[in-house]
């Protein structure tokens, strides 16, 4: 190449770089939150691209009517409402009863996880399911503040006494292992961690790469036997038996992707203890008021919750009455056990073997929760059959996640890198710095490059000469325009998204 040709090539390359910088320039004036939200829409796994199994609403037994009402009038998916109601029922019954299983007596504690995009009704469903508990907890907090103010108002002296003890709360939205251990050691025997923004839990310290196994082991131990046992230099010895913990984490699929596909957590038996729901995408809603207090089934549900809240709790739930299996229920569950053994070890469920091998114990717990909520003392064949249907739905959902790759963590890694870039000067950074100081999920060259390739494919980053990359707003030339749609909403209604827009032309799908 001659000197003139080399100068021409350099000039041309400079023009490309200048064009890239001009395209990136609006980033400085862009609201990062808007860009990140748009990136999330482009990158996140789309529920519309998968066939979600039908949620067995009738299998909820005493909770089926209220689930139907909340789903219909609250305009949320039945699976979303059902998971929230089942979790609340577990929280309210786990301290009052245990249940007979094929392998002995177990708690009624349930761990649940529900996936849904923003706007899919997570807060609506959870709020209705937990309203009696939240209102009772709010009253406890108000009473405590009043007692504390009265105590502070008293003159100093020996007659003032000790300050009032903090109330015994049942619910928290987030915690570390040490925080949960303290609360369970000092608080009431039955507690729960319920969050409709559980991404904060999975992204927090307790589920960081270094702490993940510790948190999983602690929560798994609680699930199995409710036994607290620890010795610390700062806090001393902790030993308490028969505590109960229920969990329900609701979050967006992308936020769950990395931890849910972590093979270590599955091997440790952590995720196999969770009942999973991944509902169908939320349908377009109508503009109409939702007043749950006017619905008879919701009122009856809240009344039953209040009755369970008023029931005295023991110090050790190990001694709580056991709900026994009716002979027909035991026979049904025994047959199911043998079927799951074959499917998990030699059949269609080998890919989710740890989940399938726990299916019957999970069914016994679910059946126990439904039985206790109904005020009955024996698990009937019908309750066992219903519980198996609910557990079967969970297994289908887990299979979609693990075998179908429906929650591919690559999109989550790309989004975290995109968010991180917006925190750097000029929304840009050198490639070497990303490996050294970037998000934990992109601190190898291969993972960094995979994330950048995905971001680049969606027009979210520009590579700049000199080994740097810059985050930019999603390109103005939208994918739906190129596919022949007037708006993004029309495109999505036809099943056209950024990742499959090439399959569409003139507003119609032309390729499978």
Image (spheres, rainbow, N blue to C red):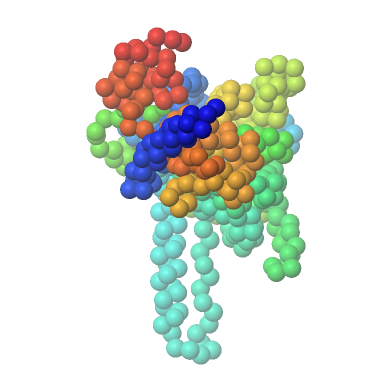
Q: How many marks?
A: 0
Residue nearest the observer in this picture, 160 or 303:
160
Residue reaching furthest to the bottom: 157
Residue nearest the observer in this picture, 205 or 42:
42
x 40%, y 35%: residue: 15
In the rendered image, residue 387, in percent from the top left (x then y), is placed at: 58, 28
In the rendered image, residue 369, in percent from the top left (x then y), is placed at: 56, 37
- Residue 158, by quadrant, is bottom right
Horizontal arrangement in the rendering, residue 40 relative to residue 388 (left or right): left
Residue nearest the observer in this picture, 258 or 306:
258
State which quarter of the image contains the N terminus.
top right
Q: Where 460 falls versus 383 (above or below)? A: below
On the question of residue 181 being in view, the answer is yes
In the rendered image, residue 372, in percent from the top left (x then y), is placed at: 55, 39
x 44%, y 20%: residue: 500
- Residue 129, by quadrant, is top left
x 36%, y 40%: residue: 22
x 38%, y 12%: residue: 509
Q: Where 417 falls versus 75 (above or below)? A: below
Residue nearest the observer in this picture, 324 or 274:
274
Horizontal arrangement in the rendering, residue 472 relative to residue 243 (left or right): left
On the question of residue 302 being in view, the answer is no
In the rendered image, residue 289, in percent from the top left (x then y), is placed at: 25, 37
- Residue 340, by quadrant, is top right
């Amino acid at each position: 190449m001659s000197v003139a040709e080399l100068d021409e090539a350099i000039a041309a390359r400079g023009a490309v770089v200048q064009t890239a910088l001009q395209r990136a320039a609006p980033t400085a004036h862009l609201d990062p939150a808007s860009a990140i939200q748009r990136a999330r829409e482009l990158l996140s796994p789309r529920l519309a691209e998968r066939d979600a199994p039908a949620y067995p609403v009738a299998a909820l037994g005493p909770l089926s009517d209220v689930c139907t009402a909340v789903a219909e009038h609250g305009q949320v998916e039945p699976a979303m409402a059902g998971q929230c109601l089942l979790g609340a029922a577990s929280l309210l019954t786990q301290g009052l009863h245990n249940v007979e299983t094929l392998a002995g007596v177990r708690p009624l504690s349930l761990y649940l996880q529900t996936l849904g995009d923003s706007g899919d009704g997570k807060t609506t469903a959870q709020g209705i399911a937990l309203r009696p508990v939240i209102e009772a907890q709010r009253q406890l907090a108000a009473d405590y503040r009043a007692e504390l103010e009265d105590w502070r108002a008293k003159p100093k002296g020996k007659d003032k006494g000790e300050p009032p003890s903090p109330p015994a709360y049942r619910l928290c939205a987030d915690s570390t292992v040490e925080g949960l251990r303290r609360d369970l050691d000092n608080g009431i025997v039955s507690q729960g961690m319920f969050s409709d923004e559980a991404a904060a839990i999975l992204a927090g310290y307790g589920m960081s790469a270094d702490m993940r196994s510790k948190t999983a082991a602690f929560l798994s131990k609680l699930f199995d036997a409710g036994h607290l046992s620890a010795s610390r230099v700062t806090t001393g010895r902790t030993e308490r038996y028969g505590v109960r913990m229920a969990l329900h984490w609701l979050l967006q699929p992308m936020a769950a992707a990395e931890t849910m596909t972590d093979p270590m957590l599955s091997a440790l038996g952590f995720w196999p203890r969770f009942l999973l729901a991944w509902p169908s995408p939320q349908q377009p809603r109508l503009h109409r008021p939702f007043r749950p207090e006017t619905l008879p089934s919701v009122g009856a549900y809240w009344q039953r919750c209040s009755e369970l809240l008023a029931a005295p709790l023991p110090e050790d739930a190990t001694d709580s009455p056991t709900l026994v299996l009716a002979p027909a229920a035991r026979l049904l569950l025994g047959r199911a056990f043998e079927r799951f053994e074959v499917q998990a070890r030699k059949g269609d469920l080998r890919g989710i073997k740890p989940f399938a091998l726990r299916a019957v114990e999970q069914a016994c717990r679910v059946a126990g929760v439904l039985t206790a909520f109904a005020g009955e003392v024996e698990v009937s064949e019908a309750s066992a059959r219903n519980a198996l249907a609910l557990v079967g739905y969970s297994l289908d959902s887990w299979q979609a996640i693990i075998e179908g790759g429906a929650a591919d963590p690559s999109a989550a890694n790309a989004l975290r890198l995109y968010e991180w870039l917006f925190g750097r000067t000029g929304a840009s950074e050198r490639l070497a710095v990303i490996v050294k100081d970037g998000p934990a999920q992109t601190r190898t060259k291969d993972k960094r490059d995979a994330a950048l390739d995905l971001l680049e494919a969606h027009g979210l980053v520009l590579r700049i000469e000199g080994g740097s990359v810059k985050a930019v707003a999603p390109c103005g030339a939208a994918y739906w325009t190129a596919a022949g749609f007037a708006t993004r909403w029309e495109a999505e209604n036809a099943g056209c998204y950024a990742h499959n827009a090439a399959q569409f032309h003139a507003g119609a799908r032309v390729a499978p």
